[in-house]
Amino acid sequence: MRNPAVEESVLNSSSPFHFLTHSTSSKLHIHSSLMSAWMHASRPSISFLIRNMKTALRAGYTGFYLHTYKLSSFKHVKMRCKCTAAKPITYEKVSKDNKTVPYSDPPASKDVNLLHEFIDRSSKLMVLTGAGISTESGIPDYRSPNGAYSTGFKPITHQEFVRSNRFRRRYWARSYAGWRRFIKSKPNTAHYALATLEKVGRVNFMVTQNVDRLHHKAGSNPLELHGTVFTVVCLDCDESISRESFQDQLKTLNPKWASEIESLENGYSGSDESLGVQRPDADVEIDKKFWEENFEIPECKTCGGILKPDVVFFGDNVPKERADKSIEGARECDAFLVLGSSLMTMSAFRLARSAHEAKAPIAIVNIGDTRADDLVSLKINARCGEILPRLLDMGRLAVPSIS
């Protein structure tokens, strides 16, 4: 009997290979996201891979195929085993009731085929991802019917952060409070499918608008157009520190305050809902009493300057070198694929427009309208996590899978 619980520890195991898993009826399918062990150490033996697979997948399945590859050649290993049930491995499946994900019907076979053909024709595919690819990981977007803007939320602007200590206190207090919840988010099937296509050479260049690093956790290394919340920088001397280091400094300056915030995180004041709504950039709603008084913000240890998350706030500009690199990629690609973005920010729309001007066909997978709908040759209204994994079983895009 199939054990429905297949776990994410597969994705986070110490094995140098990460696996994208999903289950359909009584079969377990596993796609290697191809995090090659050859990058880290000696080439693993087949017995090494089998041991790791057995350890990771002791969930009661009666058999599977293991496929691995090195460079451009595929090596197929057929393996049948009956694993005794150990600690159940659970697979996080996105519920259709997940309020962070806008409703959409499952993608039709015709749409899957069209997207497959679009990617298969390209030899220099550029991919741009937006907040819509992370909603299935529990991180809300801004502009969808369920997004942050639907509740009247207004993100902080660059000008507000720089000019007002009050705004900085508000931002950092809320961001500190939401950090633990934010970093618990895991890559979803869309992230892993995209990483797999990248590893097998079907994605030439990837750019993301997201600051959540979920692509990195899945094995990709995209250009982060709007930066990342995982780094904190000084506005005066450009010194940078890790976000974890900043969190520790903030807690040291405000021990009693941090204890009260953590009591909300742990549900001691009712439940985790005490922290309020999670936002796309990691902050949450908290009562203003937590930041209006008795709350100090760390300063740069090098020069005493203002510390800011290394993200492009609204009202700020993408750094020139980063913007130029992304524009160059759009002009040189032979196809441009948008995943989970409405392209409402100029920094993102500019890329689609540049690709269009260079005569590259454009495809968009997004729930709802986008700013570039008039420029595209293919528009699919679907969840990224419901269409991208299906490409891995199709034609020349197929990645050996377990079935």
Image (cartoon, rainbow, N blue to C red):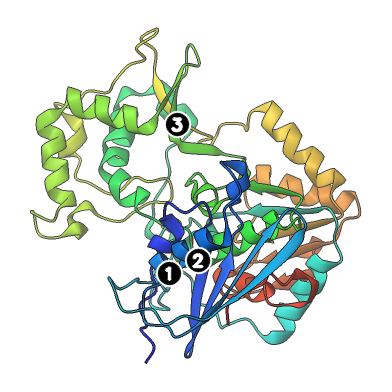
Classify the position of the N terminus by image quarter: bottom left
**Residue 357 location (% of width, % of height):** 88, 49
Quarter location, residue 109: bottom right
- On residue 129, the disc is none
Q: Considering depth in this image, is 146 or 225 the residue closer to the camera?
A: 225
Mark 2 → mark 1, Cα distance in angstroms: 6 Å
The residue identified by callout 1 is: 54
Q: In this view, does 39 lie above or below 95?
A: above
Q: Residue at 39% of width from left, 9% of height from top?
A: 302
Determine whether label 2 and label 3 are within 8 Å by CB.
no
Disc 3, SS: strand
- 338 and 183: which is toward the camera: 183
Looking at marks 2 and 3 on the same chain, the residue that comes earlier in the sequence is marked by 2
Q: Do the residues labelled 2 and 1 touch (CB within 8 Å)?
A: yes
Residue that carries the numbered disc 2 in the rendered image:
50
- Check disc 1 and give the amino acid type: Lys
**351 left or right, relative to 280:** right
